[in-house]
């Protein structure tokens, strides 16, 4: 597979699924269990928010600006998932089928319950995340100044919009927000967070009326990984969720790769066709709606415009998903 010709997010997902799991020593693995990495890839419109020592991911309800917008939960057919669609759907880039996913649209107003989904703070007591490159406003990745995994590649709204005095709307980050505004939320207390930026990444200019506008590569996805102890004989990982304020229930499960000791789910907040038949866009769509996370403050709404091939970080296609996570 030539990842320069395909969706970079897809190729990065394949790399995640085929990689070996890092080891953990904080807690002994119980008898009859196997320690595996569970990855949830977040793509489409989403916000990664600092929440004290924790992180909070919220998925805005996008139906107001596109009636086809949905929050999709997906897993590749190679994991033999259950609880999703009865038949898989191919993801096609150009004329190439790059993967096939079982999926379902999640009803607005849910909390992803990571504790019920296998997250254990004794295994992952802290959050590992890095935003190297923010202070120096790096344009392209480099191992020393801003590695490809840095959260810098998730645009920081205040920085790219000449913002000041910005205050996040408390009604959007409270435990039970309005489902018409926030489709889903996920509170993260431990594990690792990395950007999914390919070696061949397009740059975007965040154009405003002020001029002197930031330019940087942009990640189409955020990868969150935690470790879970699952049955060693029949290793499966589960995703649990609850309507705001209600008890949790299992909404999907998937078989763990015994070779890699890993499994990957995807939360994609996009119109389904944008995920299954992605095409490069000139701009990051609906970016003006990212600013609805703020209650007050001063900012200039930016229009992120994809640069020319000569402006890219490397060579090849720099991403096809219509929008990706940002940081308020």
Image (spheres, rainbow, N blue to C red):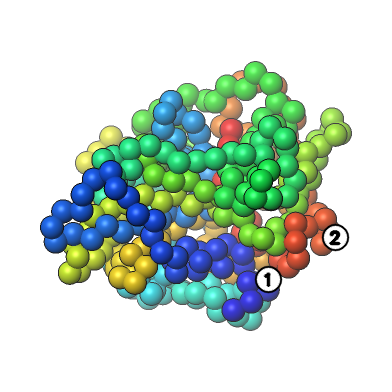
Q: Is residue 288 visible?
A: yes
Question: What residue is rendered at 66% in x and 46% in y?
Answer: 144
Image location of residue 25, percent across then percent down: 29, 48
* SS of the residue under disc 2: helix
Question: What residue is rendered at 61% in x and 64% in y?
Answer: 8
Compared across the picture, whether 281 is left or right of 240 comes to right
Q: Badge 1, how many Cα within 10 Å: few under 14, some, many 20+?
A: some
Q: Which mark is residue 180?
A: none
- In the rendered image, the quadrant that contains the N terminus is bottom right
Asked if the residues shown at circle 1 and circle 2 are in contact, with their CB atoms under 8 angstroms apart, the answer is no
Q: Badge 2, how many Cα within 10 Å: few under 14, some, many 20+?
A: few
**Which residue position holds label 2?**
310
Image location of residue 90, percent across then percent down: 50, 75
Distance from disc 1 to disc 2, alpha carbons, whole Å, reads 15 Å
Image location of residue 199, percent across then percent down: 67, 60
Give the residue furthest to the left. 31
Question: What residue is rendered at 31% in x and 59% in y?
Answer: 36
Q: Nearer the viewer, residue 162 or 37?
A: 37
**Which residue position holds label 1?**
4
Q: Nearer the viewer, residue 119 or 172?
A: 119
Image location of residue 20, percent across then percent down: 41, 64
Question: What residue is rendered at 57% in x and 22% in y?
Answer: 167
Q: Is residue 70 visible?
A: no
């Amino acid at each position: 597979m030539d990842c320069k010709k395909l969706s970079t997010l897809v190729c990065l997902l394949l790399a995640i699924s085929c990689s070996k799991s890092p080891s953990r020593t904080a807690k002994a693995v119980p008898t009859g269990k196997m320690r595996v990495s569970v990855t949830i890839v977040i793509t489409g419109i989403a916000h990664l928010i600092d929440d004290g020592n924790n992180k909070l991911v919220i998925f805005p309800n996008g139906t107001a600006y596109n009636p086809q917008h949905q929050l999709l939960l997906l897993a590749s057919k190679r994991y033999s998932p259950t609880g999703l669609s009865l038949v898989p759907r191919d993801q096609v880039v150009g004329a190439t089928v790059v993967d096939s996913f079982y999926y379902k649209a999640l009803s607005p107003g849910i909390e992803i319950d990571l504790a019920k989904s296998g997250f254990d703070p004794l295994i992952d007591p802290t959050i590992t995340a890095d935003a190297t490159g923010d202070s120096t406003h790096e344009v392209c990745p480099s191992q020393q100044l801003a590695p490809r995994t840095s959260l810098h590649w998730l645009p920081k709204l205040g920085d790219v919009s000449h913002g000041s005095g910005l205050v996040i709307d408390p009604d959007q980050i409270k435990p039970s927000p309005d489902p018409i505004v926030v489709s889903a939320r996920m509170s993260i207390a431990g594990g690792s967070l990395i950007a999914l930026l390919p070696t061949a990444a397009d740059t975007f200019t965040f154009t405003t009326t002020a001029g002197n506008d930031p330019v940087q590569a942009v990640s189409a996805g955020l990868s969150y990984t935690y470790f879970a102890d699952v049955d060693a004989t029949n290793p499966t990982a589960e995703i649990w969720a609850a309507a705001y304020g209600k008890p949790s229930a299992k909404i999907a499960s998937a078989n763990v790769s015994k070779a890699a000791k890993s499994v990957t789910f995807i939360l994609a907040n996009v119109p389904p066709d944008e995920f299954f038949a992605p095409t490069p866009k000139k701009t990051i769509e609906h970016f003006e709606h990212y600013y609805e996370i703020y209650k007050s403050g001063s900012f200039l709404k930016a229009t992120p415009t994809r640069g020319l091939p000569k402006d890219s970080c490397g060579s090849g296609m720099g991403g096809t998903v219509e929008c990706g996570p940002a940081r308020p």
